[in-house]
Image (cartoon, helix red, strand yellow):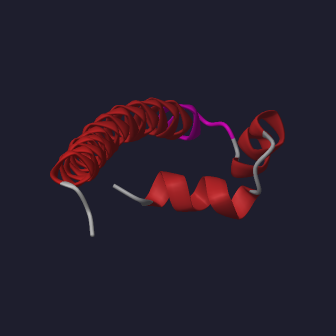
Amino acid sequence: MLSSEAAAAVREGQDGFERARGRVWIERVRVGLEYRRGMRRIDEDVAAARLERDTRIREAAAGGASYRELATALGLSHSRIQQIVNRR
């Protein structure tokens, strides 16, 4: 038979376990939210850089640069340059 002191000790251990497990879930949610915010910022930065690059490519093409010249300078294919120029 389990003594009342032993039962109290077991309950205390269980309570500590439950508190720790609850903190783990809270921390996982917090880290997940921070990750999503960070990834959103990175995605926004990449989109801004892409917009800047594409604008410069369009300006160069409008200024008379050939798609092949631009492709060679940027390490892209001429068909990729054409896609960028034609996308608006």
In the rendered image, the vertical position of residue 19 relative to residue 2, given as above or below: above
Residue 34 lies in what quarter of the image?
top left
Please state if 81 lies on the left or on the right of 27 as rendered.
Answer: right
Nearer to us in this view, 22 or 84: 22
Nearer to us in this view, 80 or 60: 80
Work out which quarter of the rendered image holds the C terminus and state it. bottom left
Q: Residue at x 40, y 30 (%)?
A: 45
Residue 1 lies in what quarter of the image?
bottom left
So how many labels did they put on this image? Answer: 0
Nearer to us in this view, 24 or 85: 24
In the rendered image, the vertical position of residue 1 relative to residue 56, given as above or below: below
Nearer to us in this view, 38 or 57: 38
Residue 42 on image: x %, y %: 42, 34
Please state if 63 lies on the left or on the right of 88 as rendered.
Answer: right
Q: Residue at x 76, y 46 (%)?
A: 71
Residue 37 lies in what quarter of the image?
top left
**Residues in magenta?**
59-65
Residue 54 on image: x %, y %: 49, 40
Q: Residue at x 57, y 32 (%)?
A: 60
Q: Please tell me whether residue 38 belongs to the stretch shown in magenta.
A: no
Residue 12 on image: x %, y %: 21, 43
Please state if 75 lies on the left or on the right of 86 as rendered.
Answer: right
